[in-house]
Amino acid sequence: MRHVFVALCGLCWSGLLGVRPVQALGISINQPVVQHSLSPGKTIQGSMELVSHHDVPVHVSVYLEDWQYTPVGDGSKQFAPAQTLPRSCAGWVRFFPAQADLPPHGRAVVDYTIHVPDDQTLEGSYYAVLFFEATLGEAAGLGAKGSEDPEATVRFAARLGSLMIVDIEGTVRREARLSNLRLAPTPSKTVSLTASLVNEGNVHLRCEGSFHVLGEHEVVMGRGELPARYVWLGTAVPVEAEWSGTLSPGMYTFVATYDCGEEIIVVEEAPLSIR
């Protein structure tokens, strides 16, 4: 018999710290993010609960992968086989069971152990994702001209996951800067902004942005939001925004600000000339 595997939906993320339950999948987890601060050589154990919202049994496979933010900066993620990305901690994680059969509206517990290698050169944060992939059902496939093909079976599946983040205790360094801030006023009085947000630390960053337009005596003449940016360590992501406002001809100061958490505030200024 020939099997065709169909993924109904992938991992649904809500920013960094959220994995929304996938409604088409009909299962959820109580820990969308697992984050621990550990010293080299230390071990921690924990568990997470998997809940089925289906009226029928669901078979779930559990496995690890690596992840990191893409260079786009919008929070989208790149996934890769376990222990292949530079900041992977997948090799530090053990979990049980690898397979679970959830009864209708039932629950299952997945236990995990994280053991950090006794390596004093480790610093910053390391990452993995524990995926839960559920088989939803099977249906006979269609052959030529819409006829059923008894040799083909379509299997419907989807997955969601729990981010796993390990901070090496006492080594986390959060640093960022905003560079290449450029402003381009247009005849329509729209100001276009481009810049790069650079992560110079050793952990991922999730940054919320805003801007102010200052006039004489630093009076605020306008304000707005900058797009949230998600920046992988050692990388830079683009920032683009537009502001439409009414300003009299003259010189102004445009102040862009990003709050990257843990009191990390990035500020950059640029002159703005309105003619």
Image (cartoon, rainbow, N blue to C red):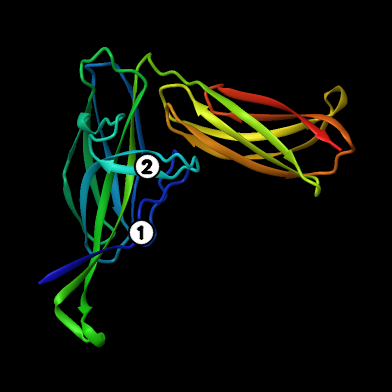
* Residue 160 locus on image (x, y percent): 33, 50
> Is tag 2's residue or tag 1's residue first in the polypeptide sequence?
1
The residue that mark 2 highlights is 32
Residue 105, above or below 231: below
Q: Label 1 sits on what residue type?
A: Cys
Q: Residue at x 80, y 49 (%)?
A: 188
Residue 145: percent from left, percent from top: 25, 87
Residue 207, image x, y percentages: 54, 33
In this orientation, which residue lies closer to the viewer: 208 or 256? Answer: 256
Q: Say what amino acid the circle numbered 2 marks.
A: Pro
Residue in view at x 23 percent, y 38 percent = 82
Q: CA distance from mark 2 to mark 1?
A: 17 Å
**128 lies left or right of 205:** left
Q: Nearer the viewer, residue 270 or 35?
A: 270
Residue 9, labelled with which disc? 1
* Direction right: furthest residue: 248
